[in-house]
Image (spheres, rainbow, N blue to C red):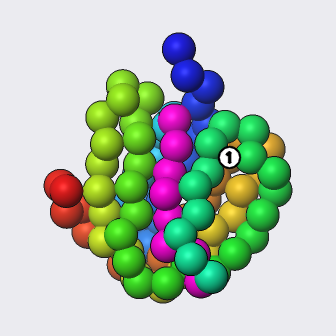
Amino acid sequence: MEATFNFKMLTPNHTALDGEVISIMAPGGAGYLGILAHHAPIITTLKDGDLKVRMKDNRVAHFKIGRGLLKVAHNTAVVLTESVEETGA
């Protein structure tokens, strides 16, 4: 079984996702970045773009997000974004 970490994706109006995931691929301000379990602490900007999440059950969820921030620390990743919409692929 692959290692997991806690992931939260929040907008000003709701929690879009909160749970254990295997990985995320996010549109960072300087390019796409991948996050796996036990990633080094980081805080970075996010730009509009596609965010992929590999869920604990290996399903891949696709989202279109607005600008925001990504914080990773203590095996937890949090995305704060203006908007999020699940796209399906």
Q: Position of residue 81 (x, y in %)?
A: 48, 76
- Please provide the residue range marked out in magenta: 22-29
Q: Left or right of 62: which side holds 40?
A: right
Residue occupying image coordinates x 66% and y 37% = 37
Q: As rendered, which of 83 and 42 lies closer to the eye?
A: 42
Residue occupying image coordinates x 26% and y 69% = 85
Quadrant assignment, res 34: bottom right
Say if residue 80 shows up in the picture.
Answer: no
Q: As rendered, which of 40 and 16 lies closer to the eye?
A: 40
Residue occupying image coordinates x 79% and y 44% = 74
Quadrant assignment, res 66: bottom left
Q: Which residue is mark 1?
A: 76
Q: Position of residue 53 (x, y in %)?
A: 41, 49
Q: Is residue 73 above or below residue 14?
A: above
Q: How many marks?
A: 1
Q: As rendered, which of 82 and 38 lies closer to the eye?
A: 38
Outermost residue toward the left in this view = 88
Outermost residue toward the top in this view = 1
Outermost residue toward the front in this view = 31
Q: Is residue 13 above or below residue 17?
A: below
Q: Is residue 69 above or below residue 86?
A: below
Q: Is residue 68 above or below residue 63?
A: below
Q: Left or right of 1: which side holds 87?
A: left
Q: Position of residue 82 (x, y in %)?
A: 43, 82
Residue occupying image coordinates x 19% and y 56% = 89
Residue type marked 1: Thr
Q: Position of residue 29 (x, y in %)?
A: 59, 83
Say if residue 61 shows up in the picture.
Answer: yes
Prevalent SS, magenta region: strand
- Residue 54 lies in the magenta-colored region: no
* Label 1 SS: strand
* Label 1: few (<14), some (14–19) or many (≥20) C-alpha neighbours in 10 Å: many
